[in-house]
Image (cartoon, rainbow, N blue to C red):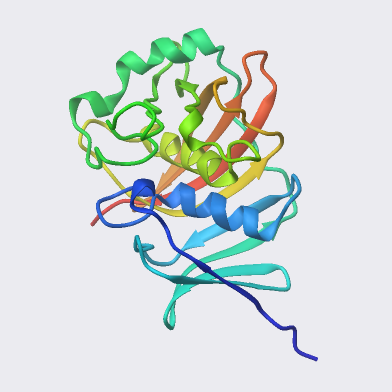
Amino acid sequence: MTTAALQTVLTVPERFRGPAGVANGGWIAGTMAEALSDNRSAVEVTLHAPTPLETELRLEHVANTATLSHADRLLVEAIPVAEDVQAPEFVPFTEAARAEAGFAGWHGHAFPECFACGLREPGDGLRVFPGPVEGTDLVAAGWRVPFTVADEDGVPRSVVGAVLDCVTGWAHFRPGESALLGRLAVQVHRRVYPGGAYSVVARATGREGRKLFGESAIYEVDGTLVAAARATWIAPR
């Protein structure tokens, strides 16, 4: 017996871009995680190709897999993950906000229009600017959640994924450096609220050839874990 696929159409608005002309990888990962799971289980999302903007894409859900395709080309695949995603340790909000002064992107940003970490107007982009936390191997930022990213159910998992994504890259990048997200495992434990203040924390966990590895987390001001992610980036040749 075959399982019928549940199909919907997804179009990524221009606002949610990462590199010019394509979707932010974390936004896509969060969207796929929400399509696959409505609980606190982790979802691993693999980006096989850049996702175009303002284009009708096919989102399919078959058994325990969700895929995103354009015509016959597979763009993204999501599967559930049994184990919890590990999170870097908590950094208090005031300390995380101070770390933003060291954000490498101030001195050279490969993707200044990125929805999550780009230098966009307040309320349009998320403006998450992680910098090094003194005396640690962490980077962190204080995220002040704009009301403009919320819907009737609060802040969607797509936005949470975008926050968890870019910060893992900046755990590696020096000014002007870049890479593209290849895989993101996302686990959301509780809701994010518009207008709230959160600590965003990440660390680099290794490198293998062109692959860069990192982990990230979002914390409430009292140190409660909100969400965590494990990322693999692919550096350019």
Q: Quadrant of residue 8?
A: bottom right
From the viewer's perspective, is residue 70 above or below residue 45? Answer: below
Q: Residue furthest bottom?
A: 1
From the viewer's perspective, is residue 36 above or below residue 213? Answer: below
Image spot of residue 166 (x, y percent) = 41, 39
Camera-side residue of 122 and 106: 122
Q: Residue furthest front?
A: 152
Residue at image x 32%, y 41%? 114
Residue at image x 30%, y 35%? 118
Image spot of residue 233 (x, y percent) = 40, 50
Tell me the quadrant of the picture where the N terminus can be found. Answer: bottom right
Image spot of residue 213 (x, y percent) = 46, 44
Q: From where the camera sits, is residue 134 visible?
A: no
Q: From where the camera sits, is residue 194 visible?
A: yes
Residue at image x 76%, y 48%? 39
Residue at image x 57%, y 20%? 196
Camera-side residue of 63 and 121: 121
In this rendering, position of residue 25 left or right of residue 33 = left
Q: Quadrant of residue 7?
A: bottom right
Image spot of residue 62 (x, y percent) = 68, 75
Tell me the quadrant of the picture where the C terminus can be found. Answer: bottom left
Q: Quadrant of residue 153?
A: top right
In this rendering, position of residue 235 left or right of residue 196 = left
